[in-house]
Amino acid sequence: MTHVLVNHKVADFTKWKPVYDAHSGARQAAGLTEEHLLRGVDDANQVVLLFAANDLKKAQAFVASSDLRETMQRAGVIGKPDIHFLN
């Protein structure tokens, strides 16, 4: 099973979360299943996500998509997220 680990900072978690939730259909279509959504202890706007990916190529295409980039921007992601594909 492949996993996708995402670590990024958001401007405001309470504004980020509804945009993230509304994008769940796109994640599901890419074969991603959320396993963990974690927030920093010292900084609640630091978000770490772990997804199971049932299709590596679909997951990579989703991560590289303009749809995801635009959604992250709209949600208030700050800077470039760290995204890793793991086995």
Image: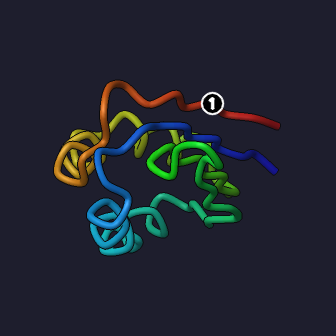
In the rendered structure, the answer to whether residue 30 lies left or right of residue 21 reads: right
The residue lying at 44 percent from left, 31 percent from top is 81
Q: Which of the 4 image quarters holds residue 15?
A: bottom left
Residue 66 in the image: state x and y as whole percent: 22, 39
Mark 1 element type? strand
Lateral position of residue 76 relative to residue 4, left or right: left
Q: How many labels does the image show?
A: 1
Establish if 66 lies above or below 31: above
Q: Is 11 in front, or is 35? A: 11
Q: Position of residue 18 (x, y in %)?
A: 31, 73
Q: Nearer the viewer, residue 73 or 84?
A: 73
Give the residue type that dot 1 points to. Answer: His
Q: Residue 76, how many percent across, how many down?
A: 24, 47
At a point 47% along the width and 37% down the height, the residue shown is 8
- Colour setting: rainbow
Which residue lies at the image location 56% right of the left edge and 62% below the top edge? Answer: 31
Residue 63's x, y, as percent?
42, 39
Q: How crowded is mark 1: few (under 14 residues within 10 Å), some or many (20 or more)?
A: few
Judging by the rendered image, the residue that carries numbered circle 1 is: 84
For this view, does 3 lie left or right of residue 39? Answer: right
Q: Which residue is drawn at 82% across and 37% down?
A: 87
